[in-house]
Image (cartoon, helix red, strand yellow):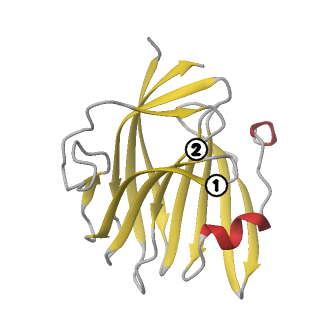
Amino acid sequence: MRKEKIEKHEVKGKTVIKKTYRASWDRAVRVEEWDIPAPLKMEDVKDKFKEVKLDELA
Amino acid sequence: MGKLYQTLGTVTLVNNTGKELLLTVPDGKIWKIYAVRMHNGDDVARNQLLKVVDSNSNSLHFLGYVANATAGNTYEMLSHIPTSPQIRAPFVGGPVLVKGGNKLSLTWQAGGASSGGTAQYCVTYEEVAE
């Protein structure tokens, strides 16, 4: 089972979710999944989150 | 010659919520991108976008865009004709290079109220040392 780090932040009344995990095909690859409710865009939310380093993920 | 990857993955699309998937190229490596397929697994049309961004999610290059990707359809995002990616379009003639630390970004933009769903993606790339 993959270990993922999930972060949530409220931005303009909407919940933005970011999941970070290592790729299943190469554990040296960091994968980020962002769920950004409309009408928010990445530019509106990215500063609320800090980048997760690979060594934080088992 | 580097190592060839042909990855197949899925993401969950949520009602009226955009999904951005970021794949970070490992430090000290270069990815040569040959093909990217994106599927709209939702029941509403969504715009689909493929680009290269830096470590702060600043856009570097726009590689492919499909306006109103039809629900349930799948698209090859890199095309021989840069302005017209199409369903089952031929693969791009040469690879796109992405530097270590930068990211390949696959975005399914929000398409309004929907049931959500599961979207497939596939990326074919060669990883070589920088």
Where is residue B36? Give x, y as percent.
Answer: 36, 44
Where is residue B115? Give x, y as percent.
Answer: 40, 80
- Crowding at label 2, few (<14), some or many (≥20) Cα neighbours within 10 Å? many
In this rendered view, identify the residue nearer to me: A3 or B18. B18
Instruction: Check disc 2 and report its element: helix, strand or loop.
Output: strand
Instruction: Check disc 1 and report its element: helix, strand or loop.
Output: loop
Query: For the residue marked with disc 2, what is the amino acid?
Result: Lys
Q: Are marks 1 and 2 on the same chain?
A: yes
In this rendered view, identify the residue nearer to me: A17 or B85. B85
Toward which corner of the image does residue B117 lie, by quadrant? bottom left
A37 shown above or below A31:
below
* Residue B89 located left or right of residue B104: left
- Crowding at label 1, few (<14), some or many (≥20) Cα neighbours within 10 Å? some
Query: For the residue marked with disc 1, what is the amino acid?
Result: Ser
Toward which corner of the image does residue B24 lie, by quadrant? top right
Q: Which quarter shows the C terminus of chain B?
A: top right
| Residues marked 1 and 2 touching at CB (< 8 Å) | yes
Which residue corresponds to the image point at 80% horizontal and 56% vertical from the top-left? Answer: A50
Per the image, the residue denoted by label 2 is B103
Q: Can residue A1 be seen in this view?
A: no
B53 shown above or below A45:
above
Where is residue B28? Give x, y as percent.
Answer: 66, 23
A12 shown above or below A31:
below
Q: Which quarter shows the N terminus of chain B?
A: top left
Toward which corner of the image does residue B39 lie, by quadrant? bottom left
Q: Can residue B37 be seen in this view?
A: yes
Which residue corresponds to the image point at 36% horizontal and 72% vertical from the top-left? Answer: B46
* Residue B48 located left or right of residue A44: left
- Circle 1 marks a residue in which chain? B
Q: From this viewpoint, which residue is outermost toward the top?
A: B1
Which residue corresponds to the image point at 38% horizontal and 43% vertical from the top-left? Answer: B122
Per the image, the residue denoted by label 1 is B57
